[in-house]
Amino acid sequence: AYLTDRPLLKQLYRQYRALRARSAGLDEDFDDDEEARDAEPWVPSEDLLERYGDGLTAWFAQMERQAEAAGVRLIIYFHPYMALGMDGELTFPTQPDCLRVFAESCARAGVIFIDMTGEFRRAYEQDHIVAKGFANTALATGHLNRQGQRLVAEAVYRAIQQAEGETT
């Protein structure tokens, strides 16, 4: 219900699902499962990336104007899909061009963007922390766990501090 009440979020969610399905070479109505993770990666055309960026920039600019009118800054954080292999390797199969365009669109619209991929990788490699999964689920799947929420909260806090430093 939350997404259906907020058209911009609903559209972003639909676009994300469609791009994720396309990145796996699947129909846009594909329901996420093992086949999507095992498919060959999709590489978007420059034309598609340009249209994707233009659309995102327009949406983000509209959201930023609404946030500004409310006296707040818009922050979007990205917590990537993760895959933990049987060998213990943690991978992040996000399509890099799409993520780059997403980040650039945020910057053009004045939106603060936080990509958690590097922080999640560092936490896993240095501190042996997996940001997603629970005792009753598979590691690296599903929702953020307590450690993942802490990592995101710290990143958002740093972004707020930096933004406040830029305005003072």
Image: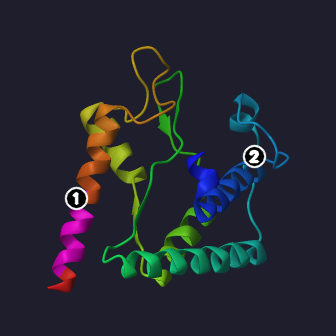
Residue type at mark 2?
Ala
Disc 1 is placed on an element classified as helix
Give the residue displayed 22% in from the left and 62% down from the top: 158
User: From the viewer's perspective, is residue 40 above or below residue 102?
Assistant: above
Identify the mark nearer the N-term, 2 or 1.
2
Residue type at mark 1?
Tyr
**Magenta part of the chain:** 157-165
Disc 2 is placed on an element classified as loop
Measured from the top left, where is residue 110 in percent x and y? 42, 81
Q: Nearer the viewer, residue 102 or 69?
A: 69
Q: Residue pushed farthest right?
A: 27
Residue 107 in view of the camera: no
Query: According to the image, label 2 marks what residue?
Result: 24
Query: According to the image, label 1 marks what residue?
Result: 157
Q: Quadrant of the C terminus?
A: bottom left
Determine whether label 2 and label 1 are within 8 Å by CB: no
Q: Quadrant of the N terminus?
A: top right
Does residue 94 appear left or right of residue 49 in this picture? left
- Determine the CA span between mark 2 and mark 1: 34 Å
